[in-house]
């Protein structure tokens, strides 16, 4: 539970840092700089102190990164304009955990117990209550077109990509452990991030060719103001955050780890309140209480 909770908190801080860096550099540039910096740090560690590109599960980790970083992130990017940040986050977190649990049960034969299912369901219900998009009080519903089946399908693909990437990663770690060659979380993260680097660079090049690398309004990127947030985002998200996530997958079932990780959008709330003055709503507070109750239940049991 400790590594899963650490991963969740690091992911939450990474989200706030990412928002700051995107506002200063634009999404494509901020994303590619973040993942390149993280990959460079992980490469130094992995090749000097860790496992580098060695190990019996290298292929599984690269496949995991291809699905988790590539397919999942690409689907999120394509679905965002139609679904919005809240709804896509809700779909990825609340669908990803049960997809991972069912996949691991059918493939690896590790079903969840009754307590894990009950506590995980309470966590996901709390996240749904806090994040489900609604119109502000006293305002008319926005007259927007339906997102369409294809956009909802992209949200499901993103959730499945996150789930299957995590299951593949756990499978690879169990194989390495059973072979007597366990791999530390930072080395696993390095092996997985290689596919993410390819996707991020390809996306940046495509955006550059389309003229969409710079921020809205054609303002010049503010690299001097943005680099601390890029570094913090790289350290807390794709480096240390994912390493703690991989650490957790060795110790707990994928469905349990993803249920804890689903708390990330709620954990962003106090960070956003502290750094940006965004006060939480009563609904987000009540949903957060439900999710925390589920986490305590899961931890105690």
Image: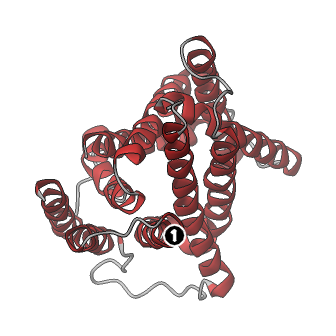
Quadrant for the C terminus, please.
bottom left
Q: Quadrant of residue 6?
A: top left
Report the front residue among 193 and 90: 193
Left or right of 248? Residue 229 is: right
Q: Which of 27 and 189 is in front in this view?
A: 189
- The residue drawn where x is 46% and y is 35% is 243
Please report the residue visible at 52 percent of the width from the left and 54 percent of the height from the top: 166
Q: Percent from the top left, x then y, of residue 13?
A: 37, 39
The residue depicted at 57 percent of the width and 61 percent of the height is: 164
- For the view shown, which residue lies furthest in the top direction? 48
- Tell me residue 35's x, y (percent): 63, 34
Q: Quick one: which residue is furthest to the left in this view?
A: 300
Q: Quadrant of residue 72?
A: bottom right
The answer to whether residue 19 is above or below residue 73 is above
The reply to whether residue 208 is visible in this rendering is: yes
Q: Is residue 82 above or below residue 21?
A: below
Q: What element carries label 1?
A: helix
Give coordinates of residue 15: x percent, y percent. 44, 45
Give the side of residue 193 with respect to residue 49, left or right: right
Residue 132 position by quadrant: bottom left
Which residue occupies 52% across, 62% down?
163
| Camera-nearest residue between 291 and 28 | 291
What residue occupies the far front of the structure in this picture? 179
Query: How many C-alpha atoms fall within 10 Å of the one at disc 1: few (<14), some, or many (≥20)?
Result: many
Between 141 and 108, the one nearer to me in the picture:
108
**Residue 214 seen:** no
**275 shown above or below 96:** above
From the image, tell me which residue sits under label 1. Answer: 103
Question: Percent position (x, y) of residue 101?
Answer: 42, 68
């Amino acid at each position: 539970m400790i590594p899963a909770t650490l991963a969740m908190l690091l992911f939450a801080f990474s989200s706030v840092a990412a928002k700051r860096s995107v506002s200063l550099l634009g999404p494509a540039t901020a994303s590619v700089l973040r993942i390149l910096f993280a990959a460079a740090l992980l490469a130094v560690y992995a090749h000097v102190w860790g496992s580098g590109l060695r190990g019996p599960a290298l292929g599984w980790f690269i496949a995991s990164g291809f699905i988790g970083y590539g397919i999942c992130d690409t689907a999120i990017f394509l679905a965002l304009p139609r679904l919005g940040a809240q709804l896509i986050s809700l779909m990825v977190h609340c669908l990803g955990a049960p997809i991972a649990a069912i996949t691991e049960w059918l493939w690896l034969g590790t079903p969840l117990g009754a307590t894990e299912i009950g506590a995980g369901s309470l966590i996901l219900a709390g996240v749904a209550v806090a994040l489900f998009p609604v119109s502000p009080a006293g305002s008319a519903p926005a007259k927007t077109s339906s997102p369409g089946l294809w956009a909802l399908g992209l949200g499901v693909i993103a959730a499945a990509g996150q789930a299957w990437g995590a299951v593949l990663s756990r499978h690879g770690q169990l194989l390495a452990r059973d072979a007597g060659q366990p791999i530390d979380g930072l080395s696993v993260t390095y092996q997985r991030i290689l596919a993410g680097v390819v996707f991020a660079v390809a996306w940046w090049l495509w955006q550059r060719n389309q003229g969409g690398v710079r921020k809205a309004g054609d303002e010049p990127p503010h690299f001097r103001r943005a680099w601390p947030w890029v570094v913090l985002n790289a350290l807390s998200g794709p480096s240390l955050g994912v390493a703690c996530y991989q650490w957790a997958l060795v110790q707990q079932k994928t469905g349990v780890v993803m249920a804890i990780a689903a708390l990330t959008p709620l954990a962003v709330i106090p960070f956003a309140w502290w750094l940006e003055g965004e006060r939480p709503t009563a609904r987000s507070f009540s949903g957060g209480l439900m999710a925390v109750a589920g986490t305590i239940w899961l931890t105690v049991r």
